[in-house]
């Protein structure tokens, strides 16, 4: 293979079981004795800077910046002279994403009220106020832009205004086409150079460009399986790749255009990262393997100069970095030395590979951007994401593990509030993640810090179906929702036995699928939780699948109906997994929150749940907000929501005079 793997920093600590904690420090250092408790307003204030990228020549850094009024704009920093320029979206709109078009231009997207996308704009770096729109009518996703012709973009029209919101296909546009003055008439048709045909079969799920920004692949879904098609540019046709995506996860095209980097799993070697020759259909020797953690969750890093794979980063219990290139390895080592006990992620580097931009994070550090200059051999801080949290009392988060009732070892994270001890155990909030096919990772989480700062321990269990682990954990039970519920229950019982928390004062709280698990928790586990909180939860899975069809989300409908069940069939299964049918078993207070414009999970699900709670006399509170989708994105709504959560938990997790002494869990 192309060099030797250099492991720069292994996972912090060894495998830990519940009750065995280790001390760690973040870039902020130990919490000073004069530290104050962060306010809700401080914890959920939009980060000052995020999504940073270097210009290809490394002279500028651009990032999304938020001001004190939660207005998001584009900030451009001249790294040589320090000059800062800002580009704001026009009145009432926010910039939410961008990409460089060579060194001189920036493409960006805006949103209205942080909810509705409004199209694409282009600005010259020398005069940011020269920005002009390309499209204002469609919901689009930029798939890539050409290295040789940076203004040529591949754009997927996810929802087309000319086709009643249906998929408009993939087009190539020229972002340098002349400016149009009448905003109401601007659409992609004014700049389209060509259109691309879809593959001959299946529903399009995603498009992918190659290293040079040209069209390379299309993913489709058909009859319960995902398929990969390779674009043949000379013939403008598609060739199906004979790679079973059910067994090979995370394919990434190598810059040579002939090889795919894929991850597969076998019982002997665990997860293996290796190359697949698209022409011969043969696999080459493995580059790296991991017995426990899925390499497909990682990010491959290729050199701009050599066009070779130089590094790889993925999640174990902490972020894990591996390098094949000595220069990249040395840069990583220098940053790690300066910021120990942190996850130091290389987020970008210039085409000449002289300047390297890192994002430093930890459980107590939301994000610090640092720049390593190889020619000057200097490392300096660019900016912090949330400088207003300096001097605040922030809790530490530790990796933990627990055993399920059927003997499977799972992982998660535990955060204890400052001052917690076995002599004075805190109440616990169980915080299962959404998804469900994602996972919790170590790092700064404002929701976790909010709960810990209010005196609660926080448990984040990675239940079965969570991504990033062995097939036994991540794949085999990914549609067994009651098993996922059981895993969360087992994690909670393990915490009760640990002596680290008050076993009689436990709440469960989550969003999306986590909201679903919160309601199954109080419905199916009587006496375990004192209360539950759900944000945008799913309570009726048959209705959830129907909604995908009603909303023209064809791929999502087919995927869910293939794996969970067709609406109108197998009602016993839908009844078993849907808490809307088990409200009579809920005997503790419930807090239901939802955005009324949610297109992922309809607010109707929450309104129905509230109606059933009322019929059964279950104490409940509600929090609905308009112009909010799947979760709350408006700062003022987030602040109000967490103030309501704070009051709700304080009311129902307070010690009761009738509480019996803590007893061991079953």
Image: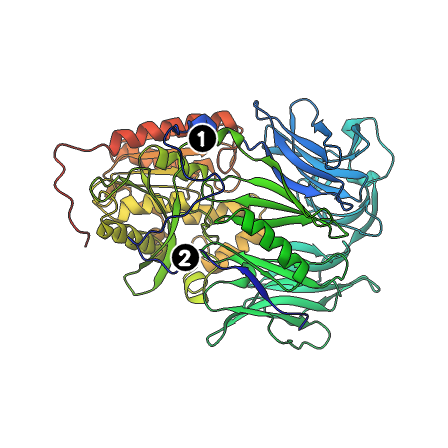
Q: Is residue 477 above or below residue 41?
A: below
Q: Against 554, is 611 above or below? A: above
The C terminus lies in quadrant:
bottom left
Left or right of 519 on screen, residue 155: right
Q: Residues within 10 Å of mark 1 (few under 14, many from 20)?
A: some
In the rendering, which numbered label is found on residue 391? 1
Q: How far from the left and from the top, in percent, is residue 294? A: 51, 63
Q: Which image quadrant: the N terminus?
A: bottom right
Q: Indicate the secondary structure of the residue bearing disc 1.
A: loop
> Would residue 39 be seen by someone viewing this image from the given angle?
yes
Q: Nearer the viewer, residue 664 or 251?
A: 664
- Furthest residue in direction right, as rendered: 178
Q: Does residue 202 appear in the picture of this structure? A: no
In percent of width and height, residue 472 lies at 42, 66
For the residue pair 146 and 303, the one nearer the viewer reads as: 303
Residue receiving disc 2: 13
Residue 301 lies in quadrant: bottom right
């Amino acid at each position: 293979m192309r060099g030797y793997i250099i492991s720069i920093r292994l996972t912090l600590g060894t495998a830990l079981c519940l009750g065995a904690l280790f001390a760690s420090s973040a870039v902020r250092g130990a919490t000073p004795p004069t530290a104050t408790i962060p306010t809700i307003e401080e914890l959920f204030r939009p980060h000052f800077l995020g999504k940073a990228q270097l210009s290809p020549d490394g002279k500028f850094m651009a990032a999304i910046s938020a001001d004190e009024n939660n207005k998001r704009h584009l900030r451009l920093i001249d790294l040589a002279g320090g000059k800062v320029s800002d580009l704001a979206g026009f009145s009432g709109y926010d910039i939410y994403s961008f990409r460089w078009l060579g060194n001189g231009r920036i493409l960006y997207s805006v949103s209205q009220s942080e909810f509705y996308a409004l199209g694409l704009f282009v600005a010259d770096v020398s005069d940011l106020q020269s920005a002009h729109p390309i499209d204002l009518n469609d919901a689009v996703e930029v798939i890539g832009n050409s290295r040789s012709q940076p203004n040529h973009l591949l754009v997927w029209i996810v929802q087309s205004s000319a086709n009643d919101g249906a998929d408009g296909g993939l087009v190539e546009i020229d972002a340098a086409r002349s400016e149009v003055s009448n905003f109401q008439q601007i659409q992609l048709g004014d700049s389209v150079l060509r259109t691309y045909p879809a593959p001959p079969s299946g529903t399009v799920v995603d498009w992918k460009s190659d290293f040079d920004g040209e069209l390379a692949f299309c993913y489709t879904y058909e009859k319960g399986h995902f398929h990969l098609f390779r674009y043949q540019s000379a013939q403008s046709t598609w060739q199906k790749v004979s790679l079973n995506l059910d067994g090979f996860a995370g394919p990434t095209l190598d810059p040579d255009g002939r090889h795919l980097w894929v991850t597969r799993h076998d019982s002997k070697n665990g997860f293996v990262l290796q190359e697949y020759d698209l022409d011969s259909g043969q696999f080459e020797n493995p580059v790296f393997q991991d017995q426990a953690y899925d390499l497909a969750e990682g990010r491959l890093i290729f050199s701009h100069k050599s066009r070779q794979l130089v590094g790889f980063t993925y999640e174990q219990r902490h972020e894990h970095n591996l390098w094949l290139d000595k220069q990249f390895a040395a840069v990583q080592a220098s940053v790690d030395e300066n910021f120990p006990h942190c996850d130091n992620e290389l987020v970008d580097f210039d085409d000449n590979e002289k300047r390297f931009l890192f994002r430093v994070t930890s459980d107590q550090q939301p994000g610090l951007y640092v720049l390593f200059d190889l020619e000057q051999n200097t490392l300096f801080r660019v900016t912090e994401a949330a400088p207003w949290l300096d001097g605040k009392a922030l809790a530490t988060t530790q990796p933990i593990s627990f055993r399920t009732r059927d003997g499977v070892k799972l992982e998660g994270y535990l955060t204890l509030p400052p001052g917690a001890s076995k002599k004075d155990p805190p109440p616990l909030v169980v915080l299962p993640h959404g998804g469900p096919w994602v996972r919790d990772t170590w790092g700064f989480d404002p929701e976790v810090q909010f709960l810990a700062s209010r005196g609660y321990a926080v448990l984040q269990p990675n239940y079965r179906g969570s991504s990033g682990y062995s097939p036994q954990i991540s794949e085999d039970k990914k549609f067994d929702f009651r098993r996922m519920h059981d895993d969360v229950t087992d994690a909670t019982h393990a915490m009760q036995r640990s002596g680290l928390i008050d076993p009689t004062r436990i709440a469960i709280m989550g969003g999306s699928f986590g909201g679903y698990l919160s309601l199954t928790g109080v419905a199916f586990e009587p006496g375990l939780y004192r209360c539950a909180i759900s944000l945008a939860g799913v309570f009726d899975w048959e209705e959830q699948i129907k909604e995908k069809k009603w909303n023209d989300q064809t791929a999502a409908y087919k995927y869910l109906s293939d794996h969970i069940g067709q609406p109108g069939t197998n009602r016993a299964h839908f009844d078993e997994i849907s808490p809307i049918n088990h409200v009579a078993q809920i005997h503790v207070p419930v807090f239901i929150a939802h955005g009324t414009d949610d297109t992922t999970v309809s607010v109707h699900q929450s309104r129905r749940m509230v109606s059933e709670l009322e019929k059964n006399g279950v104490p409940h509170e509600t929090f609905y907000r308009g112009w909010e989708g799947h979760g709350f994105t408006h700062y003022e709504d987030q602040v109000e929501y967490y103030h309501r959560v704070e009051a709700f938990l304080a009311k129902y997790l307070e010690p009761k005079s009738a509480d019996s002494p803590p007893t061991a869990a079953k």
